[in-house]
Image (spheres, grey):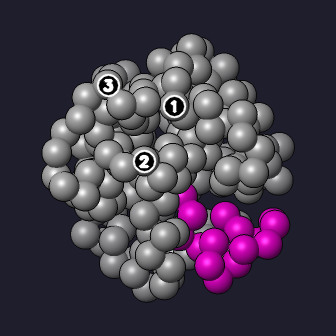
Amino acid sequence: MMDRDKGMELLREYVRSESLIRHMLCVEASMGYYARKLDEDEELWRMVGLLHDFDYERWPDMPDHTREGAKVLRERGVDEVIVGAILSHAEWNLDDYPRDTPLRKTLFAVDELSGFIYAVALMRPTRIEGMNAKSVRKKMKQKSFAAAVSREDIIHGAELIGVELNDHIGVCIEALAEIKEELELVAPDGSDVPGQG
């Protein structure tokens, strides 16, 4: 299986946007957290999260996004389980790659939510420290905030994996908090301020 160093090399080869790379790091963290929680293969789950959008900059339009990337991954000998999971996160591939495994369901469930949590954290004085589900749910109701993020996908994702939405948000917050330095989500003064919404 492709190791993380090779995965990061692939990202750097195909992605120039630091914000897109941060998104993939967020999804990687959430996938890893769920893998540990569900006693799944953490390395494999994290790789799916890390690479799920690596082709987006070159092929942003459907159905090229994911399908062109799948060709690249297959040429490089990436495990078909990873390729299939990445294909399954795009609606246009569901006939051939349904969300029918915990891996595929979880990728869909954490994709939009991880990016949304990151956006919410950027707006908070304490960044991700002390963030809770309530503050994320509040921002979800604000249609103008991160307007491109599908609230329906976030809600459906939690249902798909059978986790109550607040709990799902909490898991993804904890996952991103584990890599807060890498994501630059540490409070500017470095303090940890619990209980801030």
Residue 124 is marked as 2
Disc on the earlier residue, 2 or 3: 2
Is residue 106 shown left or right of residue 159?
left
Residue 195 is marked as 3
Disc 3 crowd rating (10 Å Cα; few below 14, some 14-19, many 20+) is few
Q: Do labels 1 and 2 touch, CB within 8 Å?
A: yes
Is residue 10 shown left or right of residue 144?
left
Question: Which residues are drawn in magenta?
Answer: 52-66
Label 3: which secondary element: loop
Label 2: which secondary element: loop
In the image, residue 131 above or below residue 56: above
Residue 63 highlighted magenta (yes or no): yes
Disc 1 crowd rating (10 Å Cα; few below 14, some 14-19, many 20+) is some
Is residue 142 shown left or right of residue 193?
right
Residue 135 is marked as 1
Q: Amino acid at mark 1?
A: Ser
Question: Would you identify the image quadrant in which residue 11 lies?
Answer: bottom left
Q: Do labels 2 and 3 touch, CB within 8 Å?
A: no
Q: Is the N terminus in the top left, top right, bottom left or bottom right quadrant?
A: bottom left
Can you give x and y, in whole percent of width and height, for residue 151 in the image?
A: 72, 38
The structure residue drawn at horizontal position 48% and vertical position 52%, both measured from the top left corner, is: 123
